[in-house]
Image: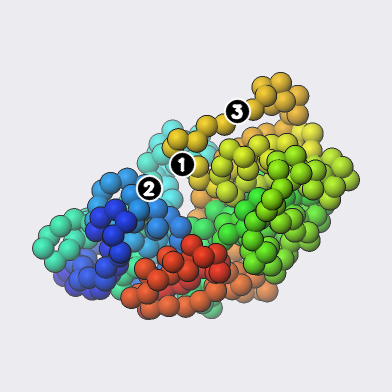
Amino acid sequence: MSNHTVKGVIARSVHAPVELVDIIVPEPGSHDVIVDIKACGVCHTDLHYRDGGINDEFPFLLGHEAAGVVSEVGDSVTHVAVGDYVILNWRAVCGSCRACKKGKPQYCFATHNASKKMTLADGTELSPALGIGAFIEKTIVHEGQCTKVSTDADPAVAGLLGCGVMAGLGAAINTGEAARGESVAVIGCGGVGTAAIAGAVLAGATTVIALDLDDRKLAFAQELGATHTINTKGLDEAAVIKAVQDLTGGHGADLVIDAVGRPETYRQAFNARDLAGRVVLVGVPTPEMKLELPLLDVFGRGGSLKSSWYGDCLPERDFPYLIDLFLQGRLPLDKFVSERIGVDAVEQAFETMKQGTVLRSVVVF
């Protein structure tokens, strides 16, 4: 084994256009693996990295929603083998932190990453997005960041479980515990929100309401199973809440998922749920945002207010199960792939994302 020089996409500084450059991938440490990337989705999180919204540890190696094939393994690796077809994840649970010891590994506080850094040709260390970095021909990750799935699944589809689609599905199924016969409303129908729609349908919800400002996104939501849509453009908060109540017998939804993450959408979610209903926040707020709610209503309405991080998923439990459902025709994951692009088109894909015309652009190698 030796170092590899491959092409990858980096963000060198805040707001600067991304660059396709030579990157050195080191030989794997004892628990590391090298994965030949086959496909990687273009996620909002990558754009946040590029624009300095995550941290300032530039340069970043972007990309994290990926599937590929294990090509090399470290000398202590037991979890995967060369030739395994895997989805990459950023929740490689440690098994020994206080969350894992409490039997809540989906909250693991010490997840594993590769032991070695990828670098630019001049030796500058790269910060891989979400500990992965997958807009690249080969990447290095910890063995626990690889989940083996059926080789029948198209990499462009399978890789999406690595972040956004799993976040939405999990917000509905794992965090929100959507159940058969329930009503579910989802505010914000980008990739994550539309995945939450799909999750609600998968769980057997019979009333699934999609809310967004954009009719194109509402059309995506209907394709994934929304039974009702509400275009909230020009509606005040009271009108949005009433629109949801009108579709749920005047009561509000059993579960409302906020896939936007703004104070106004959260208030709408809080008030558009039934008594003892649940709210799940999966949209990511910015640091300066503040929320004010009447404390009496927090008490009096009951139910639960939760946040969902990576859909409260456990990759080893959830990825194979969801891929099997896809292959059985019971979960239309392929509908999230709006376009397939080359690795040299990531910057353009960010612009397409901002226009809201795609659910996911996917880089295919």
Percent across and percent down for residue 97 are 40, 36
What residue is shown with label 2? 53
Observer-nearest residue: 146 or 138?
Answer: 138
Q: Earlier in the sequence, mark 3 or mark 1?
A: 1
Expressed as whole percent of the image width and height from the top left, the position of residue 83 reads: 37, 75
x, y (%) of residue 293? 64, 27
Q: Residue at x 46, y 57 (%)?
A: 44
Is residue 314 visible from the viewing direction of this image?
Answer: yes
Query: Which amino acid, by three-letter code, is at mark 1?
Result: Thr
In the image, what residue type sits under mark 3? Glu
Q: Nearer the viewer, residue 116 or 339?
A: 339
Secondary element under disc 1, as helix, strand or loop, is loop
Give whichever of 285, 304 is nearer the camera. Answer: 285
- Locate residue 123, reporting x and y percent: 12, 60
- From the viewer's perspective, is 182 left or right of 134? right
Mark 2 vs mark 3, CA separation in Å: 24 Å
Can residue 308 be spotted in the picture? no
* Mark 1 vs mark 2, CA separation in Å: 9 Å
Label 2 crowd (10 A; few <14 / some 14-19 / many >=20):
some
Is mark 1 in CB contact (under 8 Å) with mark 2? Answer: yes
Marks 3 & 1, CB-CB < 8 Å contact = no
* Mark 1 or mark 2, earlier in chain: 2
Q: Which mark is residue 286?
A: 1
Q: Residues within 10 Å of mark 1 (few under 14, many from 20)?
A: few
- Height in image: 266 above or below 341? above
Return the residue found at the far right: 249
Instruction: Look at the numbered disc 3 and give the secondary structure of its residue.
Output: loop
Q: Which residue is mark 3?
A: 292
Q: Secondary structure at mark 2?
A: loop
